[in-house]
Image (cartoon, rainbow, N blue to C red):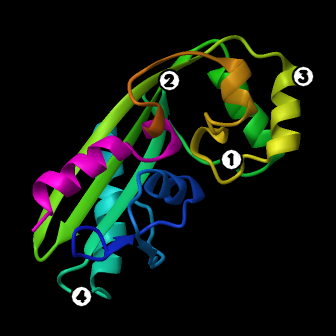
Amino acid sequence: MYKGAPVILASQSPRRKQLLEQAGIPFQVKVVATAETFPPDMAIDEIPVYIALQKAAAVIAQCAPNDIVIAADTVVVLDNTIIGKPQDREDAIRILSALSGREHRVITGVVMQRNGKEITFSKTTAVHFKPLTPEQISYYVDNYKPYDKAGAYAIQEWIGAVGIDSINGCFYNVMGLPVSVVVQKLDQDFSD
């Protein structure tokens, strides 16, 4: 319960769970599999909120009206192209090689719903990797196996510590949830 209302996280992401726990928000996880698809002509900046809306809609149908449902989706964008989760080791190496020495954007879309009220927003963080050696990339992929991560990396892991030389925006957004904004919205828009 958060100020009298149950909070439901519509995500299996261990990072999103960790961030809500860090923020001291008690929650349950409820997930319904959804196709993470979007219209082909949709602007990239709108896609994370669109997918988060699908996730929220699938879960809210199974919740009580007073439940606060939080859903999120994160995309990594390089050269105006979405970089998804790697298919395998070679794909992870290819993705990290493409990000090496370059800046990319991480966009997280968030949907919060309760009693018919819906708030949507997105946050964008610019991340710059310094040039990575093939050995560094192979070490990270082989030891951290980033196959469930958009962009083939997690900023809070080894690759972030040694490979990222700057970020412009919210660190936690890159982890998968701009948690300070979520807490702010809970306090402002969903407190009784």
Report how far apart the C-alphas of labels 1 and 3 lie in the structure: 18 Å
The mark found on residue 86 in the picture is 1
Predominant SS of the magenta segment: helix
Of callouts 4 and 1, the N-terminal one: 4
- What residue do we see at 69% from left, 24% from top? 161
- Name the residue that disc number 3 marks: 135
Q: Are marks 2 and 4 in contact (CB under 8 Å)?
A: no
Q: Nearer the viewer, mark 4 or mark 3?
A: 4
In the picture, measured across the screen, residue 100 lies left or right of residue 19, that is right
- Name the residue that disc number 2 marks: 104
Magenta residues, as a range?
A: 173-192
Check disc 2: other Cα within 10 Å, few if <14, some if 14-19, many if 20+: many
Disc 3 marks a residue whose amino acid type is Glu
Disc 4 marks a residue whose amino acid type is Ala
- What residue do we see at 46% from left, 74% from top? 29
Check disc 4: other Cα within 10 Å, few if <14, some if 14-19, many if 20+: few
Report how far apart the C-alphas of labels 3 and 2 lie in the structure: 21 Å
In the picture, measured across the screen, residue 118 lies left or right of residue 157, that is left
Disc 1 marks a residue whose amino acid type is Pro
> Can residue 42 be seen at all in this image of the molecule?
no
The mark found on residue 64 in the picture is 4
Q: Position of residue 72 (x, y in %)?
A: 38, 56
